[in-house]
Every structure is written in C-alpha cells, then in structure tokens.
Amino acid sequence: MENELYRSEVECKRESEEIDFSDGEKNEKGKISYHCDICGKSFSGYRYFMMHKRVHTAKKPYRCDICGKSFSENGNLTIHKRTHTGEKPHHCDICGISFSQNGNLTQHKRVHTGEKPYQCDICGKSFFQKYDLTVHKRIHTGEKPYHCDICGKSISQNYNLTRHRRIHTGEKPYQCDICGKPFSETGNLTKHKRVHTGEKPYPCDICGKSFSHCDHFSKHKHIHTGKKPHSCDVCGKSFSQSNGLTHHKHTHTGEKPYQCDICGKSFSQKINLTGHKRIHTGEKPYQCDICGKSFSVTSNLTCHKRVHTGEKPYQCDICGKSFSQRLNLTNHKRIHTGEKPYHCDICGKSFSQNGHLTRHKRIHTKEVTLL
C-alpha cells in the first residue's frame, strides 16, 4: 500500500510537469481549490484534481494483471478486478442482492425507496441515475453521438452501440454456467439465471408480490397507482410504460421489425420472437414448482399456475364475472358490446372470437371438397 501511495505521488508530480494546470486558489472561506485550465472544472482536493487531469492526458497507469486492461485510477482497477473474481462486497439490506460497486448499490436502493433525484429540466421526467437523465435528454436534442462503423447507424448510447454491433458479429460472450446458454448482453444472462435459481429480488412494498425482473416490477407498480402517462397520438389509448406504447403503435403501422431467422415469421415485439423461437428449439425454461410442467414463455407459466391457485384476477366491469386470463375477459366482454371483429373473407360473416372464425371457415373448405 505504501509503495502504491508513493507511486501515485511520483506520478502526480511527473504529470503536473507535463501539462499546464493553474495553481490552487483560495476561496472566500480560505480553502484551496484547483482549477483545470482545459475544461474549467474545479476540485477541492489536489488528489482528485490530479486524477481528473488524466482525462485530458489519456494516461492509464493501472493495469489489470489478469486481462491487461488499463485504467486511469487505481479504484477503477479494483472494481474491474471483481469481474474476474466475481466478488460483490456491497449488499442491499432490504432484499439482500449484492453488487460489485457501492454506486450500483446506491442506485439499486432507489428501486425500493422510489427516489428519483435527477430531473429533466425540459419535460420534468425524473430518473434513478444521472446517466439515465443524460441519455434521456438526447430524446429532446436528437443527439446520437455514437456511430456503427459497419452499417453507419447512429445511436444515442455507447452501451447500445456495443450491443448493436453484436447484431453484425453474432457475438454472445456471456454464457450461463448452469445450462450453457450464451447471451449477447450480461444483463440478459443475469435475468436468465433467475430461471434456474428462482430468485425474485424485486418485492412490491404494497402487496408483497416479488419479481425476478426490474421492468416487470415497474409495470406491476402501475396496477396500484393506475398511472398511464404514455398516450397513443393515433387512437388515444394510454399505457403505463413507453415500450408498451411503442409496441401498440405497431398495430396501427403494421410494422413487424423482429424476424425469425429460421422460418422467416415476423413479430411486432422482440419478446414474441424470443418465445416463438422456442417452437423450433423445443426449449421450455419456465417450470411450475407445483406440478413440474414446463413452458416456453413465462406468461404461460403464470396463467398455468392459476389452475392450482384458482386465482381469477381479470374481472368484467359490467357483470362482475372473473377470469384467469386477460384474453378470456376480452372475449367475454364482446357478449355485452356485441363486437365481432373477425370477418370471414369468403362469405362476410362476423365472429366475436378468432377461434370461432377458424371453425366457421371449415364449412367452406368442406364445400370445396364436396365439389
């Protein structure tokens, strides 16, 4: 440790000779502050001032002895090494989930507290992290500073550029150590592992229900608040989340940007493509812990579990009848409204359910066979 501190002091002296920074100045309280004459940023401590100047000099004196990656600060090297060791020393005292960085723990705790300290001065939207606010502001400015050198596409986030490039390369560097399944993103691997462990680190403090994914937890919260801030400018329908609105708009445009590379079938949502691909692979990663039956998509497992629990969370607001599935409620409501959205393209007859239309069409196919 002493050698490391000595090394840092020597480096600081050497670096200060190589680049011209203004001397420390005393403020009105008599405290010295250090000003960078390149970017104007000020620091109260000399150590932080010297660490900052490496941003301009691009010096990275701290090297990982495992993979060779270099860093400008020793603290960043320490954090990086945890990617090799798997060490996660910072624990959430609410749900027990662990993190390799204290900053990530601080951000995570806001999931429980609901605190969003970073607010957009243009639209007022608030965020858990400062970085998320920075990225959000690009929606207003239209800024997309990161460019793909393969297809030329411009992207607002550097992380998304890295993910995008894997579309071209097919790289999936993150592999599940339980089943061997590879992933292009570390976040998807983390979520996938919860299929095996059953971990649900996001509990609702209102009803006690727990979730394996943060986005599922966020969606669930709106059940209690009833908040739907995202409205479709075509039909006026409102959604609790912006991605729900994005997916909905595809019903108006007919856009299906996600295509299966095996059979060519296209989908409006990426999650539907993921579920569809399991038809080809036969993968059924979601298993019922009561009877052992497996499913290809988590929503089918959720619906199935209601066979055991008897839960019927979808209630008709006209007659009060309850259903275990939302689709069944939608079909039922058409008894009250008289809506028949499915039309036979041969005889023009209308039906309230798609299954009824399918059965009806067999009348015409039998007629053709008889002829």
Image (spheres, rainbow, N blue to C red):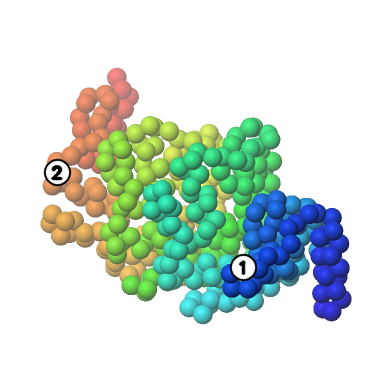
In the picture of the structure, the residue carrying the numbered disc 2 is 337
SS at mark 1? Answer: loop
Q: Is residue 344 left or right of residue 161?
A: left
Nearer to me, 18 or 236: 18
Image position, residue 20 (x, y; %):
78, 54
Q: Residue at x 72, y 68 (%)?
A: 46
Q: Residue at x 55, y 73 (%)?
A: 97
Amino acid tagged 2: Thr
Q: Is residue 206 left or right of residue 301?
A: left
Q: Nearer the viewer, mark 1 or mark 2?
A: 1
The quarter of the displayed image where residue 194 is located = bottom right
Q: Considering only order in the chain, which callout, 2 or 1, is on the residue closer to the N terminus?
A: 1
Numbered circle sitting on residue 316: none
Nearer to me, 160 or 365: 160
Image position, residue 75 (x, y; %):
72, 68
Q: Residue at x 29, y 68 (%)?
A: 310
Numbered circle sitting on residue 27: 1
